[in-house]
Image (cartoon, rainbow, N blue to C red):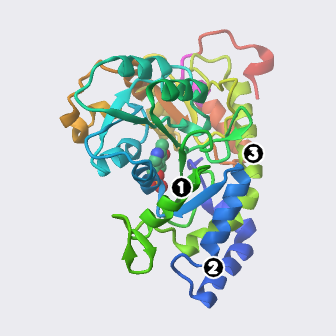
Amino acid sequence: MKISALDLKKQIAPIRRELDLAIKGVIDDTGFILGPGVGKFEKDIAKYCAAKYAVGVSNGTDALSLSLLALGIKSGEGVICPAFTYYATAGAIAAIGARPVFADIDKETYNISIESVEKILLKQHKFKLKAVIPVHLYGQCADMSGILRLARKYKLRVIEDAAQSFGAEYRGKKAGTLGDCGAVSFYPAKNLGAFGDAGAVLTNNRAVNEKLRILRNQGNKNQYFHSLLGRNNRMDTFQAVVLGVKLKYLDAWNKQRQEVAGYFNKHLSYLAVKLPFTAPYSTHIYHQYVLRVPGSNKGLLGYLRAKGIDSRVFYPLPLHLQKCFKYLGYKKGDFPEAEKASRQTLTLPIDPNLTGEEKDYIIQQVRDGSQVKAKLSPKRGHL
Ligand SMILES: Cc1ncc(COP(=O)(O)O)c(C=O)c1O
């Protein structure tokens, strides 16, 4: 059996007519750049997230860079982010000339460790620390009360990287609405995915919203009058209307992901692998379903892949050890939990459309491929 990590064809098929009509509408209207579909989608996601403003942009990476620029972060200033996240979190900091300052992660949630951030803040640095980017990794929120407490104490701006968690909630508030800005990615494989690149910034601050709109559109305040050094980071109207259709289904798809995760949790709980942990302050929308294998992920990863299961490692090398960030001067051993997570974690396919047969096949292969520690209980050990 072959099981891909995500089958977008299955997601698209039942809503194909709606999508075709939305795309046709853009062609008929010819409002390809910042057309009416973009404004409508911005209103829809602001409402969905109960945020005052949402600004549609070109992708999640630009959503992060634009947020930093809109909040006044300057070249050479330090921005704290986790060492264990997708490259773009730190890449977006470096792209505006600021300096990524890495923190370790919490070993249960894989999100930024508050203790590690505080340690950084207590140290002397040659540069000013101006902001922190907690990443809501894999679909659950970082410990935002800890982050916001430190941000208040040390006067830091907070930009949430909600690229993987659009729709997740931290104590009843949507991911991306707790800090100064929330950056979202609509990369096609995200829980809410476009038909190409797209992203958005959420904010409750009117001045930041206005600045973001100018920055994303070549610094134009009025056409051909440039009040800021802006960029071409606009959201494409085609993407906005596709996302507008899909948004209506997002909660149902996230619920299906939670059900798949619940099924895996139930049937894998007796194995030596560590199951995903959901912190009490957050919901989990399972952008990824991540297992931790004691020792190393290599054996189980190879086994599952050989059995046709599209298991992956997000991320095999933490950011402080990446060649591109060598200039920052970090070394192996600086962030032990990030390094351990890179060695030990792997994903299982968490497609909302997995069939019962596919889910059971995955469970069987994880069972066969991992060390069974505890005795199988007759109830839980058989599907
Ligand atoms: C944690 C994280 N941050 C940022 C991004 C960047 O988003 P995009 O690919 O839309 O630029 C991603 C997307 O993969 C991500 O997973």
Q: Is residue 199 visible?
A: yes
- Judge the density around disc 2: few (<14), some (14-19), many (≥20) Cα neighbours within 10 Å: some
Amino acid of disc 2 = Ile
Task: Determine whether the beta carbon of the residue marked 3 sits less than 8 angstroms from the nearest atom of ligand 1.
Answer: no
**Along the polypeptide, which appears first: circle 3 or circle 1?**
1
Which mark is drawn over residue 23? 2
Q: Which residue is mark 1?
A: 207
The 10 Å Cα crowd at callout 3, few under 14, some 14 to 19, many 20 or more, is some
Is most of the magenta stretch helix, strand or loop? helix
Mark 1, Cα crowd under 10 Å, few <14 / some 14-19 / many 20+, is few
Sequence-wise first label, 2 or 3: 2
Choose between 208 and 104: the one closer to the eye.
208
Membership of 367 in magenta stretch: yes
Q: Is residue 312 left or right of residue 348?
A: left
Over which residues does the magenta segment extend?
366-371
Dot 3 amino acid type:
Gln
- Residue 120: % across, % down: 36, 21
Above or below: residue 36 compared with residue 216 = below
Label 1 lies in ligand 1 vicinity (Cβ under 8 Å): no
Q: CA distance from mark 2 to mark 3?
A: 27 Å
Labels 1 and 2 touching (C-beta < 8 A):
no
Mark 3: secondary structure = helix
The amino acid beneath tag 1 is Ala
Residue at 46%, 16% (x, y): give it: 115
Mark 3–mark 1 Cα distance, whole angstroms, equals 38 Å
27 lies above or below 315: below
Q: Which residue is mark 3?
A: 256
Closest to the observer, 80 or 88 = 80
Spatial separation of the CA atoms under disc 1 and disc 2: 32 Å
Foreground: 39 or 10?
Answer: 39
Instruction: Please give the label number shown on residue 159.
Output: none
Q: Earlier in the sequence, mark 1 or mark 2?
A: 2
